[in-house]
Image (tube, rainbow, N blue to C red):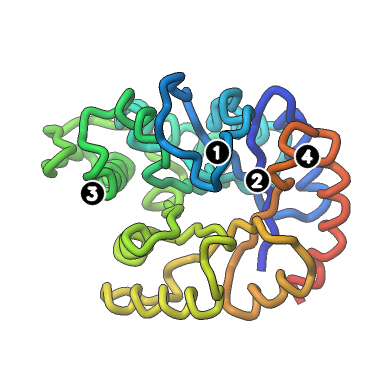
């Protein structure tokens, strides 16, 4: 099982080049950055974990530019968006941005995406109904894959529509970067089982992790797909120890992504000690 690291990616966090180099030197597999282009001041949507929304959400850097900076400082470390809000950008510009990053990083990119939790943010950037966001995301991903793979792609869905275009260059990775669906609820999990290259849940929302993973694999089979073809990347929010990581490995999880706890998001000095601590267990996870 791979060990990855995720960060809020604010100006107060370690510089992407510094962080990426440190992760690569210590044997981490990948670095994941999330995305919020803005946070509406009039937000009424409750913060999912409860309480007040942490201030770092208001300060997040652009994930693609940050990951490009990280790629330039490394040679083998992989990169991911955890998660990117694909529906909140122009589809053509976004497909090209991702293809460019994939090419310039020599195919080291993965894309985690989801529908987001902030309704006002979604509605500021997207003309489609918030209640249809899962269907909109499914079409966005399908249309983006066409832009990455076809010579003259077109798409005619319920929400996403465009006539044949030239969209070059293509990503280095055949078919484009793997796309992970970041979702915990039944509907999001169903979508992940039906069309995503991977599932990216958060462990605290999974209940009994072993039962949830088994149920997800059955959903993948029901969708006519092989569970071995759908990668699982668990974001760990519970207390992290080697026994938990090994148990996830033994359940067939391909990647565990760790990060500093929410109460330390405004304390960047905690990042490097955490990386040093968990680097020690990487050889054991690969055993």
Query: Left or right of 6: which side holds 179?
Result: left
Distance between the Cα atoms at labels 1 and 3? 21 Å
Determine whether label 2 and label 4 are within 8 Å by CB.
no
Distance between the Cα atoms at labels 3 and 2? 27 Å
Query: Mark 1 or 2 closer to N-term?
Result: 2
Numbered tag placed on residue 135 in the rendering: 3
Determine whether label 1 and label 2 are within 8 Å by CB.
yes
Q: Is residue 90 depicted above or below 234 in this figure?
A: above
Query: Left or right of 262: which side holds 125?
Result: left
Determine whether label 1 and label 4 are within 8 Å by CB.
no
Residue that extends furthest to the front in the rendered view of this protein: 51
Query: Mark 1 or 4 closer to N-term?
Result: 4
Viewer-side residue, 89 vs 49:
49
Residue tagged by mark 2? 6
Residue 105 occupies which quadrant of the picture?
top right
Residue tagged by mark 4? 21
Viewer-side residue, 173 vs 273:
273
Residue 132 at x, y percent in the picture: 22, 45
Q: Secondary structure at mark 2?
A: strand
Query: Mark 1 or 3 closer to N-term?
Result: 1
């Amino acid at each position: 099982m791979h060990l990855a690291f995720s960060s809020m990616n604010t100006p107060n966090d370690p510089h992407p080049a510094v962080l990426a180099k440190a992760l690569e030197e210590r044997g981490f597999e990948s670095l994941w950055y999330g995305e919020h282009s803005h946070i509406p001041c009039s937000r009424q949507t409750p913060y999912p974990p409860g309480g007040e929304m942490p201030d770092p959400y208001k300060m997040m850097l652009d994930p693609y530019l940050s990951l490009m900076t990280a790629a330039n400082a490394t040679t083998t470390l992989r990169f991911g968006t955890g998660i990117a809000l694909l529906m909140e950008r122009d589809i053509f510009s976004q497909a090209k941005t991702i293809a460019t990053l994939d090419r310039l990083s020599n195919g080291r990119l993965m894309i985690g995406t989801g529908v987001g939790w902030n309704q006002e943010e979604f509605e500021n950037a997207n003309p489609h109904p918030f209640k249809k966001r899962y269907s909109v995301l499914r079409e966005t991903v399908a249309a983006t894959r066409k832009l990455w793979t076809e010579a003259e792609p077109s798409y005619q869905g319920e929400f996403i529509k465009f006539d044949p275009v030239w969209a070059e260059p293509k990503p280095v990775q055949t078919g484009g970067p793997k796309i992970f669906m970041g979702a915990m609820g039944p509907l999001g999990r169903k979508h992940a089982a039906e069309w995503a290259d991977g599932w990216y849940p958060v462990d605290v929302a999974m209940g009994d992790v072993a039962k949830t993973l088994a149920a997800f694999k059955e959903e993948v089979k029901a969708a006519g797909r092989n569970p071995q073809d759908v990668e699982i990347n668990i974001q760990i929010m519970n207390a992290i120890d080697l026994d938990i990581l090994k148990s996830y490995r033994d359940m067939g999880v391909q990647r565990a992504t760790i990060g500093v706890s929410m109460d330390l998001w405004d304390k960047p000095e905690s990042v490097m000690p955490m990386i040093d601590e968990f680097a020690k267990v990487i050889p054991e996870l690969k055993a």
